[in-house]
Image: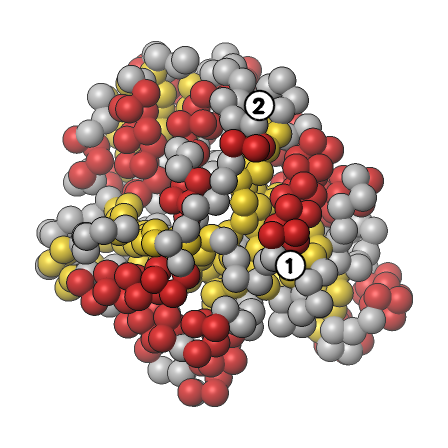
Amino acid sequence: MFRRILIANRGEIAQRIIRACRELGVETVAVYSEADADALYLRQADETICIGKAASAESYLDIPSIISAAEIADVDAIHPGYGFLAENAHFAEVCKSCQIGFIGPDPEVIASVGDKSRAREIAMAAKVPVVPGSPGAVKDDVEAARLAQEIGYPIMIKAASGGGGKGMRVASNEPSLKNQMRAAQNEAKAAFGDDTVYLEKFVERPRHVEVQILADNEGNVIHLGERDCSVQRRHQKLIEESPSAALTPKLRDKLGATAVRMAKAANYVNAGTVEFLLDKDNNFYFIEVNARIQVEHTVTEMVTGVDLIQEQIRIASGQPLRFKQKDIQLRGHAIECRINAEDPARNFQPSPGTLTAFVPPGGPGVRVDSHCYSGYRIPPNYDSMIGKLLVHRNTRDEAIRTMLRALDEFVIEGVASTIPLQREILKHADFKSGGHDTGFIERWFSSHGRENG
């Protein structure tokens, strides 16, 4: 087991890693930017080091500063959390060359699954079903038009690098394809420094279902069930749950086995997520691998009882998996609401500022993962997450009722939040019935004229 770990991240995930480490008896070093000097979790770490200014490029994305902090603090390993450098193969390679453990996959694996067109090739070789599309990156408009004719419209144009919905566009015909392809390339170049794109058949009204996997250095791979992340706006998730209301036990087993096959084909080690689209006929298609811990990993923890952060640390320290597939049982139903400092009535405009009041809910089946407190200033420099509110009950209906109660209890003042919208979603007939898909929020907003506030 590692003796001392540096956390190359901030916010609720930094606090989450500190908690896991303390229970394992592992010391923690928390790095922070000038904007995060008042973060509460810094008091919980064994050592803290300021690594730069508020701008991410001068702090959390500054590899030399993070490596210097790791060497000064004499750590055994670095946990990257999610976002920032978590899926940066170069950072993982630098850690390796400096003989600092990286709590995540090998650099080569991060690079291969992080390139979505390469990940697609790995999936096809492993006979993992993929959405019909281009065999790899698309070079120009002429090739795109030819391939689109073969695949059939509507077409999804997707950036080969990155995530979070950046560099994604839908085209319904050839003129639209050329325009949207240029827009996707420009956005991908600006966001990831790479304008490579590929094409996929646009699956209409799909569910977004992802499978959590754990893999050790001895070739053992298991899955921990699925999370349904279909409640999203512009590819940004708002509510996640497990298990998915759309899956039968037979389909769940098939999806999990497919995720394991994909992980083995990619030589994957550590925690990861294999993402799929599920169409209305229950056909599922691989879309990508997230080579890191996910924001919504906590949903899986609630239904399996497995601490995924602790398992990441154990695997990275060389320990074999402590579980076999038969040991993983999904118990009850969990729902997570991502509480963000955003104003849904103003097109989700970020709402940074000081929390004049912050009183999280409690009671049976309720969990709050948050780095915030009354008086905390949410900086404008990073994502707007206030925290994650989770509930775990015996059935989905009970979980919905408990979540509504918890949202009503949650006091957040001084900034706008997504809580009012999440209350409405949980009461909506489409969500309550479990019949929603990834277009649910856009259709609902459009029908209510809400996107423009």
Residue under the point 42% across and 34% down: 306
For label 1, the SS is strand
For label 2, the SS is loop
Quadrant in which residue 424 is drawn = bottom left
Residue under the point 75% across and 58% down: 131
Residue kind at label 2, given as amino acid type: Asp
Camera sees residue 106: no
Residue 103, x across and y down, in percent? 48, 26
Quadrant that contains the C terminus: bottom left
Question: Measured along the vertical axis of the image, is residue 27 above or below residue 204?
Answer: above
Quadrant in which residue 88 is drawn = top right
Residue 214, x across and y down, in percent? 55, 32
Residue under the point 28% across and 24% down: 23
158 vs 383, left or right, is right
| Viewer-proximal residue among 211 and 31 | 211
Residue under the point 57% across and 33% down: 326
Residue 189, x across and y down, in percent? 61, 53
Camera sees residue 229: yes
| Viewer-proximal residue among 431 and 325 | 325
Residue kind at label 1, given as amino acid type: Leu
Instruction: Identify the mark nearer the N-term, 2 or 1.
Output: 2
Which residue is identified by label 2?
216
207 vs 330, left or right, is right
Residue 410, x across and y down, in percent? 19, 61
Which residue is identified by label 1?
277
Question: Contact (CB < 8 A) between labels 2 and 1?
Answer: no
136 vs 86, left or right, is right
